[in-house]
Image: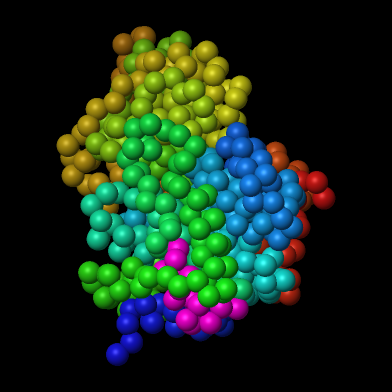
Amino acid sequence: MASLTDHTIDFTLNTLWGDLPVEVQHQVKRCLLDTLGALIAGSQTPVADIMRKTAREQFSGDQATIMVSGERASAAGAALANGFAGNALDIDDGYRPTKGHPGACALPPILAATELAGGCSGEEFLSALVIAYELGTRAGIIRHATYETYHASGSWGAIAGAAAAGRLMGLDAKQIFHAMGAAEYHAPIAPMMKGIDTPNMGKDSIGWGCMVAVLSALMARDGFTGIQSLFDDAPDAAVMHSLGQQWEILNLYFKPYAACRWGQPAVAGALKIARDQRLAPEEIKHIRVRTFEAAARLPNDHPRDTEEAQYSLAFPVAAALLDGEVGPVQVLPPRLHAPELLSLVDRVSTEVAPEFDAEFPAKAPAEVVVETTHGQTFHSGRIEALWEPPDTLPTDAELEAKFRWLVEPVLGVRPCRELVSVIWHFDSQSEARTLIRLCQKTR
């Protein structure tokens, strides 16, 4: 009888573009648009600068491209740098059952493998991306079911990235087995809540996970042996037997704001009040956020850097009330340190609402209450994060608008428009490396 790992490998190697349901084919293009937009915008952050330098100095080579800058590094180095950039703004997609980010873990290893393999078609690229999402979401579920500690995305994303990269690199079933096992064994076991209590550039350990994914595929190709992967540890075998029948890529959420997902309901509530009431900053006396316990743990101090701004509750709420948006501009200098914004941060308090905490993590609600200097009180009412399945997912037009919002300031209007067109028709591209070329700022 075939093991669950055997079933996983069979899915990895034998899933073809033509086998995918039409809605899955369309969804993976939406995911590519969204994840790539986050990566391009994230390439302009301080952490991306650091990791580009690290990749050039410690992982030098000419195998793969560091996105946007066009610099070259080894495949592992490029995946490392691109992985950090992909999650740098915390505006990439997520999957609620794992409380993590499958897309940012999947795309950088696939980009590197595309160049390692000497190229592939758009169909092959997109098929590998679907595979990475399907394996990553399930690996995360199993990881959290078998370990008590809440592990960051890189701990399970590395396994999916290794499998998808291995497929594009032409690994056989035995090599895929060892690539996934090596990735699980060497993946970052990152205690996520410590990273929230002390915001830092490690974020969701996605960059490190992407590097491990590529290295594991390369090592397995050369004969390195790995452990039996975690897929056989699934407490419920149905999680893995559903591969190819139940498509978890359809159950992702998307993020309209550059902030931790746990803070996004409060941001949505603040934006609602800002739109309805149009309050001047000096009219706001106090802002009270009622939310679930995990979100209430997000710090409310003045953020010193981009990471602290994202892993804050008070800062994005204040930015939403003041600027009407929470994007790259708000979480990067100089806006990050604007006195009028920090003054509003000081007027935010948070509290745990027991009724909201009882709904988490299946749902993530919040309520924002704004008291004015005129004695008025405005309530957002109970509100959940936007762009959640199944009822509030963004339209294609909304995802395109988000992509333009993130990418046009980096690449320009015309290259951005060209990228959008290529992505929507990527399955007709004979050469997937076209995508990488179009993302280079120096072209």
Q: Position of residue 89 (x, y in %)?
A: 53, 40
Quick check: 352 left or right of 261? left
Q: Position of residue 296 (x, y in %)?
A: 29, 32
Location of residue 178 (image quadrant): bottom left
Location of residue 430 (image quadrant): bottom right
Report the front residue among 104 and 382.
104
Residue span colored magenta: 170-183
Q: In the rendered view, would you say 392 is above or below 430? A: above
Quick check: 412 left or right of 309? right
Q: In the rendered view, would you say 358 is above or below 141? A: above
Is residue 175 within the magenta segment?
yes
Q: Residue at x 36, y 73 (%)?
A: 228
Location of residue 217 (image quadrant): bottom right
Is residue 403 within the magenta segment?
no
Extreme-bottom residue of the structure: 1
Q: Residue at x 25, y 46 (%)?
A: 360
What sort of colour scheme is used for the picture? rainbow
Report the front residue among 375 and 232.
232
